[in-house]
């Protein structure tokens, strides 16, 4: 069975600090995809990144970076030099085979000025 | 460029009332689904459809009905609302039910049952 755990319920940082959001997943499949979504205070869900199970290269997009480690079943998300606009709930999700996405409980990030 | 459109955005119901949450997508996506979001629980799948005329239950289907008569529309019906159904509801679509395809979400419907 697929399962996604985001152990950090809430994180609060001061602007310009770096912050890492943890995501641990469980799956029996060898082929699967991991996703991160952002939900800002306005409520919509914004797709950030997709990673397949065969690509363990880290990804960097501006201030955002993702670290995928199959050995620890983790797909962590780091925001460098955080900004107030990064304040949101962030969801990690797992998709395998023909099953639908399974989401973690989310991590609420607050960036204070 | 509408994407996934949900209506209404807000709704208050009395216990026992019925209503339909509307969802429409204009991307010709085969796969559509409904999630509910509750504090500390992430998004949980209610019902989904892999194409017109085909629907199936997700993780938390009780109290909800769906139908898919067209590719574009996937309404969610609450037959007799209960306070436990107070939640934020999201409709999503994907090009196909393959693990690689990302989900596109509507803006959400905040439902309160009193």
Image (cartoon, helix red, strand yellow):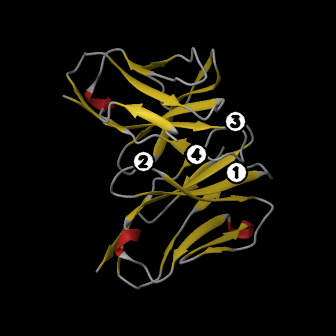
Q: Are marks 2 and 1 in contact (CB under 8 Å)?
A: no
Q: Secondary structure at mark 3?
A: loop
Chain letter of mark 1 equals A
Q: Secondary structure at mark 4?
A: strand
Q: Nearer the viewer, residue B88 or B9?
A: B9
Marks 3 and 2 share the same chain: yes
Q: Secondary structure at mark 2?
A: loop
Residue under circle 4? A102
Q: Residue at x 73, y 40 (%)?
A: B98
Q: Nearer the viewer, residue A92 or B5?
A: B5
Residue under circle 2? B41
A31 with respect to B85 (left or right): right
Residue under circle 1? A27
User: Distance from label 3 to label 1 (Cα)?
Assistant: 18 Å
Chain letter of mark 4 equals A
Residue B97 is marked as 3
Q: Position of residue B90 (x, y in %)?
A: 44, 38
Disc number lying in front (4 or 1): 4
């Amino acid at each position: 069975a697929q399962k996604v755990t985001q152990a950090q319920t809430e994180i609060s940082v001061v602007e310009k600090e770096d912050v890492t959001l943890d995501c641990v997943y469980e799956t029996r499949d060898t082929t699967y995809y991991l996703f991160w979504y952002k939900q800002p205070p306005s409520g919509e869900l914004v797709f950030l990144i997709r990673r397949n199970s065969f690509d363990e290269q880290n990804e960097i997009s501006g201030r955002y970076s993702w670290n995928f480690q199959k050995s620890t079943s983790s797909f962590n998300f780091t925001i460098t030099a955080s900004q107030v606009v990064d304040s949101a709930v962030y969801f990690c999700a797992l998709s395998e085979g023909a099953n639908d996405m399974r989401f973690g409980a989310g991590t609420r990030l607050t960036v204070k000025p | 460029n509408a994407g996934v459109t949900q209506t209404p955005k807000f709704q208050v119901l009395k216990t026992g009332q019925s209503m339909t949450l509307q969802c429409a997508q204009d991307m010709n996506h085969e796969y559509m689904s409904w999630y509910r979001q509750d504090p500390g629980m992430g998004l949980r799948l209610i019902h989904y459809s892999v194409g017109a005329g085909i629907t199936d239950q997700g993780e938390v289907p009780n109290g909800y009905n769906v139908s898919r008569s067209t590719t574009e529309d996937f309404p969610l019906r609450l037959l007799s609302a209960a306070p436990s159904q107070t939640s934020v509801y999201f409709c999503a679509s994907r090009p196909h039910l393959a693990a690689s395809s990302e989900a596109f979400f509507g803006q959400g419907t905040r439902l309160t049952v009193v």
